[in-house]
Amino acid sequence: MSKHRPGGELASRPLHFFFLLDTSGSMSVAGKIQSLNRAVREVIPHMRKIASENSNAQVLVRVVTFDSVARWNVPTPTPVEKFTWAGVNAGGSTSMGAALRLVAEQLKMPPMDKRALPPTLLMVSDGQPTDDFDTALSEFLSLPWGKMSIRTAIGIGRDADYS
């Protein structure tokens, strides 16, 4: 039986994976920033394995870090096979809403590809935003890709504020 498909091979579709990582000052307490850095390093091989098993998706990773300012730590969509993690340090306040706005800008079309799979966001934080997160979240969810995105948040540390 031939594996040849009429019309050729299926093209892989981009799957944009965004890490949103809290690097505020409170993350320097009780080993939280070290735990965050270790967790990102340890998840990479698992992400690579899953991506290699799914030829219909090209997993592209980007990273936003947020403390007093939200910034792109890895601004370019990077194939998970080439993604590496050097780690981050902690200091400042928690500009979580600004981080979400950075990602929202990338979910507009363009630059987002119409053929893309729903984007995935993983936010890791230990506390409350110090900026207007609620408005940023509403704006994010008003975008088509924002609504369709897969969103997960992880509280880090024994003192994490889950509300």
Image (cartoon, rainbow, N blue to C red):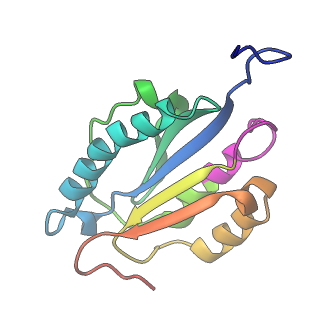
Figure quadrant of residue 7: top right
- How many marks can you see? 0
Q: Is 87 inside the magenta-drawn segment?
A: no
Q: Residue at x 70, y 43 (%)?
A: 117
* Percent of width and height locating residue 112: 74, 39
Residue 48 placed where, x, y %? 41, 34
Name which quarter of the figure residue 144 lies in.
bottom right
Question: Position of 128 compared to 148: left or right?
Answer: left
Image quadrant for the N terminus? top right
Which residues lie in the magenta part? Answer: 102-117
Q: Is residue 130 above or below residue 16?
A: below
Picture quadrant where residue 113 is located:
top right
Q: Residue at x 85, y 17 (%)?
A: 6
Horizontally, residue 111 falls left or right of residue 18, namely right
The residue at 46%/61% (across/down) is: 123
Where is residue 62 drawn, in percent x and y?
50, 40
Look at the magenta stretch and give its main secondary structure: loop
> Residue visible at 59% across and 28% down?
55
Q: Is residue 103 magenta?
A: yes
